[in-house]
Image (cartoon, grey):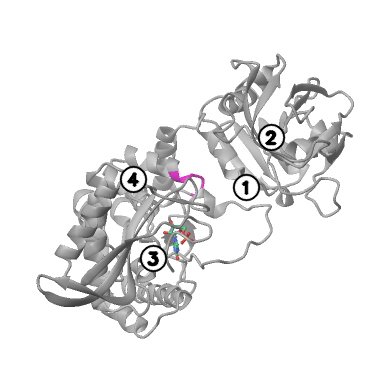
Amino acid sequence: MDKILVLDFGGQYNQLIARRVRSENVYAEIVSYKSITVKEITEKGYKGIIFTGGPNSVYKSDSPHFDKEIIDIGIPILGICYGHQLLNYLAGGDITPAKCGSEYGKTPLYCEKNILFENMPLVSDCWMSHTDSVSVLPKGFKCIAHTKKCENAAVYNKEKNLYGVQFHPEVTHTEYGKQILKNFIFGICGCKADWLMSDFINTSIQKYKNELKGKKVLLALSGGVDSSVTAVLLHRAIGNNLTCVFVDHGMLRKNEGDYVEKTLGEKIGINIMRINAQEEFLNKLKGVTEPESKRRIIGKEFINTFEKVSKKLGKMDYLAQGTIYPDVVESGKGDSAVIKSHHNVGGIPSVIAFDGIVEPLRLLFKDEVREVGERLGIPPELVWRQPFPGPGLAVRVIGEITKEKLELLKDADEIFRAEIEKAKLTPSQYFAVILDTKSVGVVGDSRAYGYTVALRSVDTDDFMTADWTRIPFEILEKASRRITNEVTGITRVVYDITSKPPATVEWE
Ligand code: XMP
């Protein structure tokens, strides 16, 4: 299988670059510049290397650098943004703050005829975001594109197969960005398009049939996309030697526990042990209002429950996990501030002894996991379900979690989701939140005093930033009317119109 290395210098688009390459059916892996050497790169047989962008200036002493031998090993390189500046710097060029100041946004790009710009017009829009630029080209390099403000917007060294672009071909704002990446991976690197999900499934099933022959495997099933696809894939390979433990902590959406059990258990035939631990979780959460404490308690209680069950099951050889590629990727970035501790229910219980861990999806991006799920025959409503946080509705019940508030929330949330789906809207995530505040209402002729529900719906590509969804008023109105009519105990419905940042998607 042909492989492209995405050498990560801390750019915010590193995963996007790898996804773009993979969407051309060429395998790409992201490795931090800190954790690979030139020798390892040579040995691993990459067909091409992409240097990612990054927030630094190459001439600063603490900026990410790389062994300059990389440019002489004969593997084609495409440098993007910071990667372009670094490539030129390593080859002996000069990088300085851009003469005309920073350039940011959509800009016309004027290209010369070059293999990198095959099958696209010579003038098109590109997406720029830089402060520095290449002011003096290294020996052997030629300029092949410019913008009004940036004279060396793209450069190349024909003899060594080195290419650099100051703009971002991986973002959709660059009109022919996809074509430029295709020209690099196929035209310049000569890759074959042989990364296919159908092959991935067959190879994985065969591999686990051999490796796990006669072994017992345990999986913590959450009902989310990743653990469900892991379960079905492993079930195909080892059948009933796979046991899935599904801990129902009571903070799942309405009827979700039954749905998961029915779809994966009864229909697909996976061996599922459902543990109804609602009461235990609620007891542990009694009186707790602080969001991070809720998360910690749920994570801990989940592990306790899982441990108790696995003790009963006797010796299991392997633990399977639904880890996916973004969980695995190391980034060149420094540690970012912890806004929320996103520990997922399903962390490894360290006290249970296993001979090993099986992570069949660890090379796949989410969209690839979904494709695998569809090909394995998992129903689309499960494969395409919106993200759901590990701690579940616990982070959507503001203040203390009580049985009453949980039930009201489940009903309101079900109505809101149904109305969105009926209207055929497809926001990235949409749900209800129950507040800790009660307010006065009128029901018939009497006074009512009930809870307030906030509806939240966002559109986003990566959940790092998000915009609130412009849901048509009629749909909001219908959801509000249905919730206040059908859910006794809720007297007020509000719609959250805050983007992320400054808000987060979840309220807690
Ligand atoms: P925030 O609220 O951080 O959410 O803007 C971004 C995305 O992450 C999900 N989320 C979580 N997922 N455990 C999870 O598995 C958590 O504790 C958690 N908190 C938030 C959230 O639903 C959204 O998709």
Q: Which residues are magenta?
A: 362-366
Please name the residue shown 44% across and 59% down the image. Answer: 505
- Compare marks 3 and 4 and give the one earlier in the sequence: 3
- Compare marks 3 and 2 and give the one earlier in the sequence: 2
Whether the residues at callouts 3 and 2 have beta carbons within 8 Å, the answer is: no
User: Which residue is denoted by mark 4 in the rendering?
Assistant: 384
User: Which residue is denoted by mark 1 in the rendering?
Assistant: 12
- Compare marks 2 and 4 and give the one earlier in the sequence: 2
Whether the residues at callouts 2 and 4 have beta carbons within 8 Å, the answer is: no
Foreground pick, 380 / 417 = 417
Mark in front: 1 vs 3: 1
Which amino acid type corresponds to the residue marked 2 in the rendered image? Answer: Ile
Mark in front: 3 vs 4: 4
Can you give x and y, in whole percent of width and height, for residue 499 in the image? 47, 55
- The C terminus is located in which quarter? bottom left
Mark in front: 2 vs 4: 4
Q: What SS does tag 3 mark?
A: loop
The label on residue 316 is 3
- Report the Cα–Cα distance between label 1 and label 3: 40 Å
- Report the Cα–Cα distance between label 3 and label 2: 41 Å
Mark in front: 3 vs 2: 2
User: Which residue is denoted by mark 2 in the rendering?
Assistant: 49
